[in-house]
Every structure is written in C-alpha cells, then in structure tokens.
Image: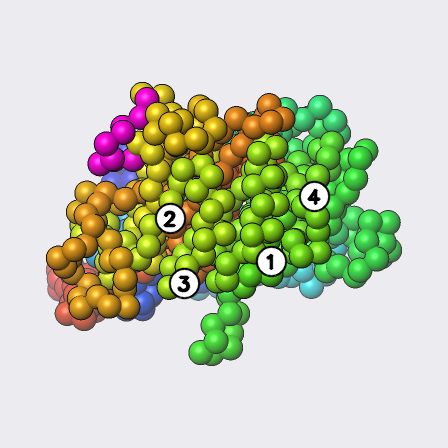
Amino acid sequence: MKAIFKREWKALFQSVTGWLFLAVTLGLFGLYFYLYNLRYGYPYLSSTLSSIVFIQMVTVPVLTMRSLAEERKNKTDQLLLTAPVSVGKIVWGKFFAMAAVFTTSVVIMAATPLLLLPFGSVALGECYVSLLGYWLFGLACIAIGTFVSSLTESQVISAVLTFGLLFLGYMMEGICGLISTQGNLLTKILGCYDLSGGMNDFFNGILDVPAMIYYLSLILLFLFLTTQSIQKRRWSISSKKIKLGVFSTGSAALALVAAIVVNLAAAQLPEQVRSIDVTAQKLYTITDDTRTMLKGLSEDVTIYVLSGEDNGDEMVKKTLERYADASKHISVVYKDPAVYPSFYTQYTDSSISTGSLIVESGRRSRVISYNDLYEISMDYSTYSQSVTGYDAEGQLTSAIAYVTKDDMPVVYQLTGHDEQMLGETFTDAINKLNVTLETLNLLEEDGIPEDAAALIINGPAKDLSADDADKVLAYLKNGGKLLMSAGYTGKEMPNYEGILSAYQVQVKPGVVMEGDRSNFYQMPYYILTKASYTEASAQVAGDYIFIPYARGIGYPGEAGAEDAGDADGTSDGAKDAGAAEDVAYTELLSTSSQAYRKADPAKMAALEKEEGDEEGAFALGLMVSAPAENGEGTEIYVFGSDSIFTDEISEMVYGNNAALFAGVLSGFTGNEDVSVIPVKSYEVQFLTINQAGVLLSGLGLTILVPLVLLLLGIGIWARRRRW
C-alpha cells in the first residue's frame, strides 16, 4: 500500500491536477477569509468554510476522476491487479494519496486562526471543530469519487457522475424538506445520503460524534464498494465470475446494513456524549446550577414542544435532550400543530407560535413562547432585528422550578415618590426566580402587606412622608427584607434616609469620584468596582459592577472610622448608638483608597480632587443584618446609586448588575435553589485589524499563494512534457 501511495502522490504533483486542486481550494478559501475574517473582523472560520463547501462539488471530481478510470483506459490496471498487492491495499493507497492532497489544504487553512490572534479574541475551539467537519466532508466526497472512478474508463464520465452524486448529497436536506416538512419514511431513507447536514453542528461549534461516525462509515462503505467493483473485473466470464458476483452483491448488502446499524447505534448515545459543546459561551450545554436542580427533582415534569420532532428548532431540541438526560423525571413530548391544532388550548387562552414549549407537572403549568427562547435586539438605525442571545435554559429552568414549587413569593416595589423603574433585564430576573412583582403605594395601605417576601425602594426622587417611613420601619423591625438604592438628587430626604439612620447607616451627601483610573470608565463618576463575596453576590464575586453617580455609605466600623467594630463585623458603635444589638455590616461594593467625595457637585470646579474633598475609600453597597421581633432577622441591602438597576448600566458589565440583583432577591425570597440562568449571548467580539494588515494578508492568501502553487504545477508539467 505504501508503494501505491507514493506512486499516486507523485502522479498528482507531477501533473497539474494536485497543484490545481490546492490553488483553487486555497484561492477561494483566501477570498472568503479576506471578506469575513480580515475585512469584517469575524473571529470564526465557520462562515468562511461554509462558503467554500460547494467548491468540493467541482474540485473533488477533478481530483478523483483519473484515479482508477485512467488505469482502466490505459490497461495499466492489469499490472496493478497482477501485482502482489491486494485490491484493498490498492484502493486505500490511492485514497490516502488523494486524501493527503486535500489534507494539505486543510492544514494550511488551520494556520489562519493563529494569524488572527494578535488582533483580538479568537474562538480557536470553534474554528478547529469547523475545520474538522469540513475535512471529514471532503474525505467522504473523495471516497465517493474514488468509487465512481472504478465504474468507468472515461475520466469525463467519472467527473460528471461524481459531480452529480455529490451535488445530490449536498442538496438532499432541501430535497427532503420539499417532499415533506413533517418527515416520513421516504425522507428518512433519503436522509441517509445527506452529505451536508452533518457539517451544520460542526460549523455551529459542536463536536458531533454521530456525524463523525456517519462520515467515517460513508468513507469505509464506498471504499469497500470500490474494492468489490474492482474484484469483479479480475475474472473473465466464467462460472467463477458468477459466484464472485453473487459474493460481491451479498458483501455490499452486508456492508450497507452494517453502516446503517452503526449509525443507528450512534444516534442512541446520550446527548452529552453525542454533542460536545466547544462554543465559548457554552450555548448548547446546561449549567451546573441547572443540573443540580434537575438532580433534586422528585416529581415528574413533562415538556411539550409544539412542533414535529423532525422539523423543530435543532438548537432547542439539543437543549431539551440534555434536560431529559440529566433527570429521569423529565420527559419531552412533541405535539405537531398540524396534527394537534388545539392542544395548547388546555393550558392558555392566548394563541402561541409554533415551536413554543409547555412545561407541566401535577401542580401547575407554564407556557414558554418560542419568541422568549431567543433574545432579539432592534437596530433603530436600520429598523432591523437580530438575534443576540439564546435563553432556552434560563426559561426552562425557571419554568421547571415554577411548576414544582409549593408557593410563589411576592415582592413589592414602592411607588408614589417618582421611583426609578426596574429595567427589563431585572424584571426578567424576577420572573425567572418565580417571584411575583407587585407595586405598592403606602398612601393606599396601612402597612407593608403580610405576604411581602421583600420590599424594593429604587431611587425615589421625592422624599417619603414620615408616615410612609414609619410603615417601612415597622416592617423591618418585624423581620422585613429591604432592597434600596439612594442616588444623588440634590435634595434633602430626611424621612427616606431616616430608615437607614435607625440602623446607624448614612448615605453621604454628594457624589463619589474614583481616583484610580483602572476602576472607572471614561469619567471618574462612572465607577467600576469588584463585588466582594457574600451568599447574595456569589455569582459575581470578583467581577465588575458598574455603579455611576454613586454616593458613599457610612456605617459604624467603616474603614477609617475610629470604631473598627468587632472582628465578626458587628459594630460596637452601632450598639452604643442605640441601634439593635448584634447589627452586622458587610461591604458589597467599595472604591479604592484613591477615591474622593464631592460634597456639592453643583459647586465643584473640576472633576479632579480639590481641597476640602473627603478622601476614600467609600462603601457603595452595604448589607445590614439585624435581629428582629419575629426572631427571623432583618436584612437590608443599600446601594448608593439609583442607576445601578438599569439595563444600559448592567449591559456595560455583561449583566453583572442584574446577576447581583437576582442574588439579593434569591436570598430574600428563599429561592436559593432557583438559579437565574442569564441569556447566553450571541454577540461577537469582532477583531480590530488595521487596513495594511487586511490588504497584505488578503493579497497573500487570495492571490499570491494560489498563484505560486499554480505556477509550480504548470512548470513541473511543462518540464515533464519536454522530456
């Protein structure tokens, strides 16, 4: 086989064929690499590779057409067949030579992601998985071309038939869709020859084990058929040939059955084994928090999918399979609206779109609209929408917790004082925690409702009345939970701040400026601070929180105060000042020691530190814990900015503000076992490549390399012709 390989390898590069294959393949790859990766800064190879897949329909037939057809035409196949080499080794030797030429082009392509590394973050795992899928597809095409070449002595007929077979396999997914959108026996049979479908998962960042097995089994099957085709020609017309023909037909049938059995077995593997997620965002993998929740399930949950199993959203399907694999209590049932048009009416009076999910247990159910599975953003400059995130896990985990939970806690948000409204991201977090959010106007109530799991007072622009403040204090003394923010308004708010004063906490006048340039964004009042570790902030501990226009928070025992407090965090000053005993203070957010406070921003002459400015460090977020009359304990979280819980601010730090908010509410409501799974972002961090680098790299990959390869091939061919 080694001798056959060397002979074929030399033949490919002593003619123009091998050089032409490399030049065309790399030239087109370079063109799309220039457009997608260099010009637009796209850090993935998937788009580039998917754009050149079709060229295999043309280049592979050129590469394979002469492999066996030319031998047969020139009668040199008789020399091979009488040589002391088995037919199988002949076939494999020729296949390996052509595969080596194709692999050479893939190896050169594999260097291109490394060229992008100096210009930004490149998803190397996804790039090389895409290349693996492209390589396996190419090898399967070469095996098919080798088989066709063994059937005829005409190179032209071999090339045309190979193109036809490859094109049919490339279009098979679309053909099956035209036959039946729901899928049937015919489409399942035809789908066995779907050459391009297996690449989709590779291009999406999934190491698809069944697809790998499919391509490898296809290669083995067609090379085996090639061997059988050649074997039949080794014998003249005789009874011996008839017997061999029967043997060849039976062997081919057995090989086909074996390939089908292997692929059916691969399809039954658990989802976590079948599909290995290599995406940077882990789009297709459920988190450890979800797995922990699923392992703790003790009752059955059914997830109904309003679509056919064969024509549903593949991404959602993979996510659902991972849920079913993670717990024996989860079952997934597909309900095709074409067959069950009114099925959803058992769960909702509203119409819902195809692809939506219904999560049901013995207690209750929840409908998840298909539109909620993806995050959609609007570009108002073009009035176009784009998918920016995938939220199936967040929605499903929340729904499963909802349908299996005993009761639904209620959180009240105070209104009537021009409070800041929570951003959509924050209300989504509340929904995912399966918490009911209600508004509360204390003018209409005698006090905080008894069913309140927590109270939110988010940056009121007007002061509370003394009566309102007393109602809040009464709630806290009885073990209430309060989340409050106090932004700079330029107004005195004695009643609102008096709630904190009862626990010896003061929101200091003015605005804090950060003096350490590494801890602010553009302006000193756009403060970036890392969250300290508590149970509430565990998910974002050590990550940046964005807190603009912040006020400092003073408390007994804070850094720089005379009374440093007890080692356990309980301040002696708080006890001596008349606050409840055993009050504990824990800083969540704080500035660096280079910070300073502008007591009256309206009168400041500069953003830089001036004479009279108080120096830091300052607490910007504080947790207060105190005993209560009901014995459960009072908890207060106070933040020195009324912008901290807005969508725009949270997005600046990749949703960390929303994660901190969810952590606080999770502790308040007793939903520590319910995790708020954030939306998995589709947004790409594009590369920044200077124009000179784009031009030079583009010229090199698109023109220089292919031209050099082509000239080498022509030169070698011309030299041999002169001989």
Question: Image height check: is 590 above or below 557?
Answer: below
Please tell me the numbered disc located at residue 589: none
**Residue sitting at x 49%, y 44%:** 499
Taking the magenta stretch, the answer to whether it contains residue 560 is: yes
Please tell me the numbered disc located at residue 507: 2
Kindly tell me whether residue 453 is visible in this rendering.
yes
Closer to the chain start, of discs 1 and 3, is 1
Closer to the chain start, of discs 3 and 2, is 3
Quadrant of image for the C terminus: bottom left
Assess whether mark 2 and mark 3 are in contact (beta carbons under 8 angstroms).
no
Where disc 4 sits, the SS reads: loop
- Give the residues in magenta: 558-566
**Residue sitting at x 40%, y 26%:** 575
Tell me how far mark 3 sits from mark 2, CA to CA.
Answer: 13 Å
Assess whether mark 4 and mark 2 are in contact (beta carbons under 8 angstroms).
no
**Residue sitting at x 48%, y 28%:** 580
Tag 3: amino acid: Lys
* Label 2 environment density (alpha carbons within 10 Å; few <14, some 14–19, many ≥20): many
What residue would you read off at disc 3?
491
Please tell me the numbered disc located at residue 415: 1
Closer to the chain start, of discs 2 and 1, is 1
* Viewer-side label of 1, 3: 3
Tag 2: amino acid: Val
Where disc 3 sits, the SS reads: loop
Q: Position of residue 61 (x, y in %)?
A: 42, 58
| Front residue (pair 286, 493) | 493
